[in-house]
Image (tube, rainbow, N blue to C red):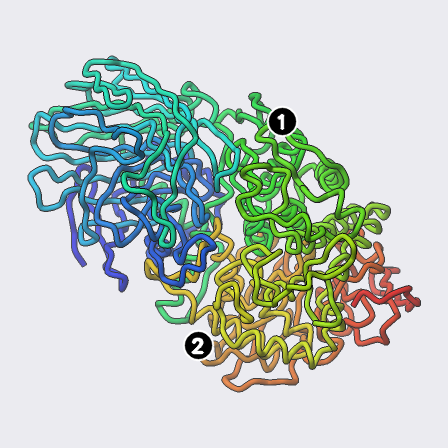
Amino acid sequence: MTTSVRKGAVKTRRRLAWGLLVPISLGAWLASSAAAQHSAAAAAPSPNSPADLAQYVNPFSGTDSGATDYGTGGGGADTFPGAVLPFGMVQWSPDTTPSLQNHPGGYTYRDTTIRGFSLTHLSGTGCANFGDAPFLPHVGAITQSPAKFGSSDTNYTASFSHSDEEASPGYYRVRLDPGSAHAVNSELTVTPRSGFGRFTYPATSAASMIINTGGSAMADRAATVAVDPAASEVSGSATSGLFCYQQDWYTVYFAARFSRPFSAYGTWNRQTLAPGSTSNSDYGLPLNCQPSTVTACPPGNPSGTAQTGAYVSFDTTADPVVDVRVGVSFTSVAAARRNLDAENPGWNFDAVYGAATQAWNRELNRVQVNGGSLAERRMLYIALYHALLFPSVYSDVDGRYLGMDGQPHTAQGYTQYANFSGWDIYRSEIQLLALLEPQRTSDMMQSLVADARESGWLPKWPVASGQADVMVGDPADPIIASAYAFGATSFDTRAALSAMVKGATAYGQSANDGYVERQASKEYQALGFVPHEENQGFYATAVNPALVWAAAATTLEYTTADFAIARFAGALCDATTYQAFMHRSDNWRKLFNPATGYLQPRYATGAFDPTFSPTSETGWAEGDGAQYRWMVPHNIGGLGLALGGKAATAALLDTFFTRLNAGPDSPYAFLGNEPTLETPWEYDWVGQPYKAQATVRRTLLGLYNASPGGYPGNDDMGEMSSWWVFGALGLFPEVPGVGLLAVSSPLFPRTVVHLAGGDLVINAPAAADAAPYVTSLSLNGQAYQRAWLPVSSMLGGATLDFTLSTTPDPSWGSSGDDAPPSFGPDTPVSSVCGAASPRAISVGGAAGVTAADLPNTASSLGKPSGLAVLLVVASAGLVKMRLRRRRRTGA
């Protein structure tokens, strides 16, 4: 353990196994200020005295390539290591160059040069965006414009070394140009909407800060800057966008106040430096290159970005420390100042840093574990940390935000959020957030409702107030339905349902960015599938947002979205909408070719694509036919029957998991990306849950670790991290829109999840790396044999007791009655009406199971196919069961 003394605080640092010094501030815990109090109030409390779980988090995890780059965004997680609060608007983090392995995160661990500390970042996205207004300390006279002609590169950079760099949740530090006479120790911390930097220069009369307002990750089409020497302030804006080369745009504003007067200042425009100037601006062209490990940019990184910014200088011969506080807003510079004044009004860096650490510890303590290895505890809290970054706060402290209609709005009674990685997070991320933070997640759902009200359509991948047609399908539907099913119900549900139905039945483009919610809506409604004639490549929507990428995958995404609409409508007791969309959710069958046993691209004539190959990506999004074969999460039982029954399906799964992360163009699993994330738990539906237990455990321990290269692919705004968290709990939200958790096995001997209604306690005293197999399970002290759990049984608190073994137990959870439910088109609305808050009852000894969440198709209960099971709560202690003949089984 080493100790360093810094201005205003004494810090002890604990050296962890990844070779980094992770700071634990002592003075900051005791400091108090208005900023600290505001930051502390920003996160809802968990335990009164949270444990120091932040010590386990390595923010550098995921910042380098550790897996094969399959062309789906790189082989790294694309995360960033800088300072950020849970769901914060500001992500103040270093950007390195050339950053080939982790370009979307801005920082690549193997690089040795930093180009600046930018105020905003996305996490794990596969495409670059944000990275706005980088700040770079510099020692020496500013003698030339930082902007290189026609390039995104700059004339000023700094070297760094990992031996003099550290990060922990809410804090980042690095010494720039270490070992030289012009080394600058640079420290960053944050509040939700502001940053605080502390920079320790050598004794010099030429200590400068360069602020590059045209330095965003993607080309800025406009940038402005203003210097106010009297207020020691620099403010400005950057207008950027083009996320994944789409047509979205945003403008971010900042106001930076320094702790001392400027000894010199100036601005630049392109290659012209203007010493003494107090304002400047420039306009650019939306031309940019994103480098990667598989696609290098032309020499010089050509870019049409706007090129302007400012520099300010200080005399540090008597006092080496220069502090800067930076407010950020997406509405105006004035709003950035208000955010700064409200959240970060003083000059106590350690108080703000301490409050950030406390905020993170409160969030991380929502999941507490005992036992397990140190490496596993680190990975758990790294994953939870990344899962709690996005969606991010978008409205200002006064509730104002710029809407998708380009007009100012005020979020009344809630916080507006932005940056939803739709295609990714509907699978498990939003369910985790709803469980841990139902009120915040409700605000996120209300934010989507506001987006639809302002733009006319629910978004796929909103960046700030921009609509981006990134990825496929209609993911807002399963996001909203899943959030509701997992306990986030405090939003305008009727407006949400109306927007969902509109997006699924109407066609049109939004006024902002020409966005189309369902590009193939007309064809899908007419045929029940998206015809292969519509199939286009990934960048087609960048040219024309009305075009369709990956027609077959889009069909399956639409059926999942339709099921989510049905489930949400049913929970609101809208029987008409429920029945219509349950019927549409069966459209996956239109792609099933019984001659091959695969879901296949199909032409409008009804003919299947004769060139189909299971290992071809044609028609699919970041996967192939072998991987999309399994994408019927709402009716796995029905899919299993189509594949030949449980034994045949299990055999196919056995082959599929020969490899866990084989990439697209492969007959095997691709668990480093979203399309196959749910597949390990499909064993629960075929009576072999012990294989799900083994496969999940292999993935948790084999594909992830705490190192910079420790992720199997892009983290996708926390989706992959949320998968790891659920996997470690031994539970997974397999069916979008349904409060159902498929069971595998817990990784830790004891886990406590602090839910809003009570604690979920998961006991597994025999848990060990080599002991993934369940031999028995009890729920609240009563034996429980099913391989799934209704979420309603645990929202008010519950205890799960697992008995685990190193030897498989093929009998546990293997009977027909034990399989999780499948939801065919004839599943009655009575099984879901009011399901978000059903009455707990006891059925067959399964305490806490509710009628609304019981299996409700014939095959899932082991009854003869062709019969549906209708469950009706007749009284507090009586459940009536009635069998009726169905026209066609859905399972």
Relative vertical location of residue 569 with respect to residue 673 in this rendering, above or below = above
- Of the 4 image quadrants, the one containing the C terminus is bottom right
One can see residue 748 in this view: yes
* Picture quadrant of residue 540: top right
Front residue of this view, candidates 866 and 320: 866
Alpha carbons under labels 2 and 1: distance apart: 53 Å
Relative to 480, 121 lies left or right:
left
Q: Which residue is labeled 1 in the image? A: 511
Q: Which residue is labeled 2 in the image? A: 769
> Badge 1 local density, few (<14 within 10 Å), some, or many (20+)?
some
Q: Amino acid at mark 2?
A: Asp
Relative vertical location of residue 125 with respect to residue 197 in this rendering, above or below = below
Q: Residue at x 66, y 32 (%)?
A: 509
Q: Residue at x 16, y 18 (%)?
A: 264
Element under disc 1: loop
One can see residue 756 in this view: no
Front residue of this view, candidates 608 and 211: 608
- Of the 4 image quadrants, the one containing the N terminus is bottom left
Q: Amino acid at mark 1?
A: Ala
Nearest-to-viewer mark from 2 and 1 = 1
